[in-house]
Image: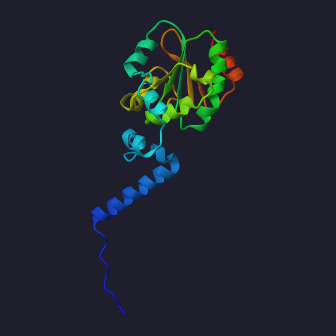
Amino acid sequence: MQTGPQTPAPLWLRLIVFALIMWAVYVMLNGWDRAPGFWSEQFDRQTKDFSAEVVAYADTLPQITLPQLNQQFNTPAPSLVFVFASWCPHCRRVMPELVGLSEAVDLPLTVISVDKNRYQLADYWLSQPDAVQTLPMQHMPAEDTARLNDFLKAHGGDNAGAIPYLAVVNEDGKVIAEILGYASKDALITQIKLEGMK
């Protein structure tokens, strides 16, 4: 049986199929909890069984905005800035090392969470040992998180965007060293001392 030329699918249908395929690839590479559009805080709060303690804690999480971080960078004193997310396995692994680092060096430490979901962050944070919970963790709102990488790059951070990310900031507000991924407490201390920090 002979058939005539087949009519291609309309352009709008091909674009929808393409968008769905790209979204599925993004989810496979980044995980469902980071999928754009379908995973809002409110939706997650309603569908996941967070305890009342987690919900209450999430609503009182300390926040840090880019203007506040910029003010800190403009303070004439060296400091450390650590960026993490609760869903990141390497970030979770480095937390106890960060506790040791904060006890061993005499530098202010800012711990910034870039989690999109405060409830997920609160659930993770409350499950941590007491020592980890003593770290000065602050949650950055999504609108500032989107510009955090550009902010750090403008201050000399070449590798901003990767997590876990530790920046050593000098008294001029410039990032003079970056440590990416997992590192032991001793390795962190060695790197910081190499930069002349105490």
Classify residue 166 as left or right of residue 53. Answer: right
Classify residue 177 as left or right of residue 63. Answer: right
Q: Does 16 appear above or below 47?
A: below
Residue 82, x across and y down, in percent: 54, 23
Residue 31, x across and y down, in percent: 50, 47
Give the colour scheme of this rendering. rainbow
Seen from this angle, which residue lies furthest top?
Answer: 76
- The residue shown at (63%, 29%) is 94
- Of 69 and 37, the residue lying toward us: 37
- Tell me the quarter of the image containing the C terminus: top right
- The residue shown at (31%, 81%) is 5
- Among the 4 quarters of the image, the one containing residue 164: top right
Seen from this angle, which residue lies furthest front?
Answer: 52
Q: Does 94 appear above or below 10?
A: above
- Of 128 and 166, the residue lying toward us: 128
Q: Is residue 124 visible?
A: yes
Seen from this angle, which residue lies furthest right?
Answer: 186
Classify residue 80 as left or right of residue 96. Answer: left
Residue 190, x across and y down, in percent: 69, 18
Classify residue 177 as left or right of residue 71. Answer: right
- The residue shown at (31%, 85%) is 4
- Tell me the quarter of the image containing the N terminus: bottom left
